[in-house]
Amino acid sequence: MKNETSPKTIQRGWLLLFLAWIIATSGTLTSLFFSEVIQLPVCSLCWYQRICMYPLVLIFPLALFPYDQKVVLC
């Protein structure tokens, strides 16, 4: 039996991945704004958050573009 996914399911998965990219990008830009523009000191726990969040901004678009149905399956 073949595992077939509907176009609606694939589109939903793509939109969820795009939303995750938007959240990661906005978090990255916000943290850079507060640390570089406003000059707020960064706490040690924020460094761990940045280490995990910054690469997502680059990884998520690789999964989105070019669109490959094998990457996003829910």
Image: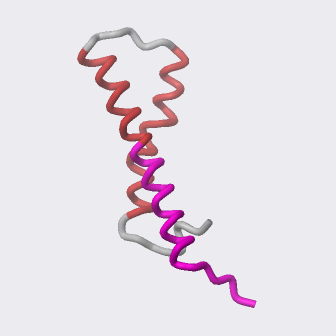
Depth order, front residue of 48/13: 13
Q: Quadrant of residue 31?
A: top left
- The stretch of residues the image draws in magenta is 1-22
Residue 60 location (% of width, % of height): 44, 53
Image position of 6 with respect to 17: above or below = below
- The stretch drawn in magenta includes residue 19: yes
Image position of 68 with respect to 47: above or below = below
Residue 52 location (% of width, % of height): 51, 35
Image position of 25 with respect to 5: above or below = above
**The C terminus lies in quadrant:** bottom right
Q: Residue at x 70, y 88 (%)?
A: 2
Magenta stretch, main secondary structure, is helix
Depth order, front residue of 57/74: 74
Q: Image check: 70 left or right of 25?
A: right
Q: Residue at x 56, y 71 (%)?
A: 9
- Labels in figure, total: 0
Image position of 62 with respect to 21: above or below = below
